[in-house]
Image (tube, rainbow, N blue to C red):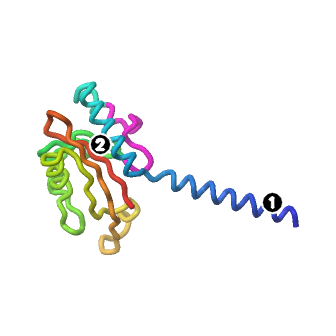
């Protein structure tokens, strides 16, 4: 009997650890704001080329948990992206969600008019991309946008709920 109790207790403990680790892998809005500000500070201190080289590295500190920082110019061209290096140099001005919201245009509007802000919209979680298009379910996403001072570009990071 005692052995069964110990085994059950260990199983409960293991489950708690697994759930805690899974939850710890989700970035927060606060982390996104902090990482975006850190990237902008790096650009200001090290210069654009040196900062972009760091931001583009998968292990450069700007990709964490389930989020990452990316940099886009006001023409919609991706300047840096540590998780999707194939996006660098690509113009994504026409990027839309299922509702037709033009995401990059919204980011540019925030950067140009307010300088910074949180933008909420619907977006697909990575696991949804594996499903047929007609079966995909969008989730709420919040992205923090911050303009790089004296430059026509901005930095973004976001979290899915």
Left/right placement of residue 90 relative to residue 161 reads left
Left/right placement of residue 44 relative to residue 33 reads left
Circle on res. 81:
2
Does the magenta-highlighted stretch encompass residue 62?
A: yes
Q: Position of residue 30 (x, y in %)?
A: 38, 48
Q: Position of residue 125 (x, y in %)?
A: 37, 61
In primary-sequence order, the first of circles 2 and 1 is 1
* Crowding at mark 2 (Cα within 10 Å: few <14, some 14-19, many 20+): many
Q: Secondary structure at mark 1?
A: helix
Comparing labels 2 and 1, the label whose residue is closer to the camera: 1
Left/right placement of residue 63 relative to residue 53 reads right
User: Is the residue under label 1 in contact with that under label 2 (CB below 8 Å)?
Assistant: no
- Above or below, 155 against 95 in this view is above
Q: Secondary structure at mark 2?
A: loop
Q: Residue at x 22, y 46 (%)?
A: 116
Q: Residue at x 42, y 44 (%)?
A: 64
Q: Position of residue 52 (x, y in %)?
A: 27, 33
Q: Which residues are drawn in magenta?
A: 54-67
Within the image, what quadrant is residue 137 found in? bottom left
- Above or below, 55 against 23 in this view is above
Q: Residue at x 35, y 35 (%)?
A: 57
Q: Which residue is mark 1?
A: 6
Please name whichever residue, 15 or 130, is drawn nearer the observer in this view of the structure: 15
């Amino acid at each position: 009997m005692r052995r069964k109790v110990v085994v059950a207790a260990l199983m409960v403990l293991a489950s708690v650890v697994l759930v805690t680790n899974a939850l710890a892998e989700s970035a927060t809005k606060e982390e996104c704001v902090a990482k975006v500000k850190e990237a902008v500070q790096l650009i200001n201190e090290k210069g654009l080329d040196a900062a972009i080289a760091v931001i583009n590295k998968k292990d450069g500190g700007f990709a964490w948990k389930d989020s990452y920082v990316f940099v886009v110019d006001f023409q919609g061209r991706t300047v840096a992206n540590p998780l999707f290096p194939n996006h660098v140099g690509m113009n994504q001005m026409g990027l839309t969600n299922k509702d037709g919201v033009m995401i990059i245009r919204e980011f540019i509007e925030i950067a140009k008019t307010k300088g910074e802000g949180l933008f909420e919209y619907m977006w697909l979680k990575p696991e949804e991309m594996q499903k047929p298009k007609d079966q995909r379910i969008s989730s709420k996403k919040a992205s923090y946008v911050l303009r790089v001072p004296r430059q026509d570009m901005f930095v973004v990071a976001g979290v899915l709920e």
